[in-house]
């Protein structure tokens, strides 16, 4: 069998890959897999949430770093990666923020997002149509990931009590939380 330069190069590449693969222990391979999983969890969570809401996922504009720092008070030096979106129209409150925090910083980021949520809940100028969605919003933490979800289908019924509106909005928020939690299984 005559080897050409190209065939020889391909064989050499396969040999190097085989040698390097054989040198990895199971624990190193599992650690590498865990690192890869961690790198995609934020993106996977975002996709799962978008999918869970379908046509009712309204955020379409990326939230700029300066807005995350000034409006949401997120310490950007504690952030490894972020996906943050809000609606194009300011009259709509739907917001998704997903953050992969630097090691040991998840609670600090969760605290900032909870403080932002508290400010929203105290804001008397929030449109009554959005009030239940604001109250049903949540901050959830999964290891080094922190999520702020203020999402869901609008409640089409106008003749319901505040309690019923909050119940509806809470069920809508739970769709996003469930989508994220299902990724852990």
Image (cartoon, helix red, strand yellow):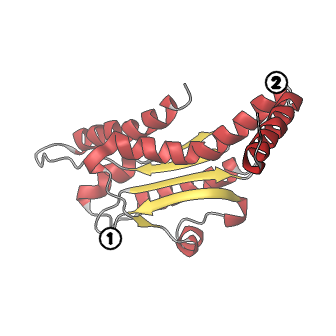
- Residue 161 numbered mark, or none: none
Left or right relative to 41: residue 107: right
Q: Which quarter of the picture shows residue 65?
A: bottom right
Crowd tier of the residue under label 2, counting other residues whose Cα lies within 10 Å: few below 14, some 14–19, many 20 or above: few
The residue that mark 2 highlights is 26
| Residue 131 versus residue 174 in the image, above or below | below
Is there a contact, CB below 8 Å, between mark 2 and mark 1? no
Left or right relative to 34: residue 18: right
The residue that mark 1 highlights is 90
Examine the rendering and report whether any part of residue 132 can be seen: yes
Name the secondary structure under disc 1.
loop
Left or right relative to 182: residue 12: right
Name the secondary structure under disc 2.
helix
Instruction: Calculate the distance from the C-alpha at mark 2 to the C-alpha at mark 1.
Output: 51 Å
Q: Position of residue 94 (x, y in %)?
A: 36, 57
Residue at 55%, 55% in the rendered image:
113
Residue at 58%, 58% in the rendered image:
82
Q: Quadrant of the C terminus?
A: top right
Q: Quadrant of the N terminus?
A: top right
């Amino acid at each position: 069998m005559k080897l050409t330069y190209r065939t020889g190069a391909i064989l050499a590449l396969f040999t190097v890959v085989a040698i390097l693969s054989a040198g990895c222990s199971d624990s190193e391979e599992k650690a590498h897999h865990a690192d890869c999983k961690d790198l995609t969890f934020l993106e996977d969570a975002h996709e799962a949430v978008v999918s869970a809401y379908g046509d009712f996922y309204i955020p379409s504009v990326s939230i700029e770093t300066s807005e995350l720092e000034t409006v949401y008070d997120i310490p950007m030096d504690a952030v490894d990666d972020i996906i943050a979106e809000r609606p194009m129209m300011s009259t709509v409150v739907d917001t998704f923020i997903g953050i992969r925090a630097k090691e040991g910083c998840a609670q600090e980021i969760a605290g900032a997002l909870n403080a932002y949520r508290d400010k929203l809940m105290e804001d008397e100028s929030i449109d009554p149509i959005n009030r239940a969605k604001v109250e049903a919003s949540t901050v959830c933490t999964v290891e080094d990931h922190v999520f702020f979800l203020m999402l869901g289908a609008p409640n089409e019924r106008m003749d319901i009590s505040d309690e019923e509106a909050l119940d509806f909005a809470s069920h809508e928020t739970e769709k996003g939380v469930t989508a994220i939690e299902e990724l852990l299984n």
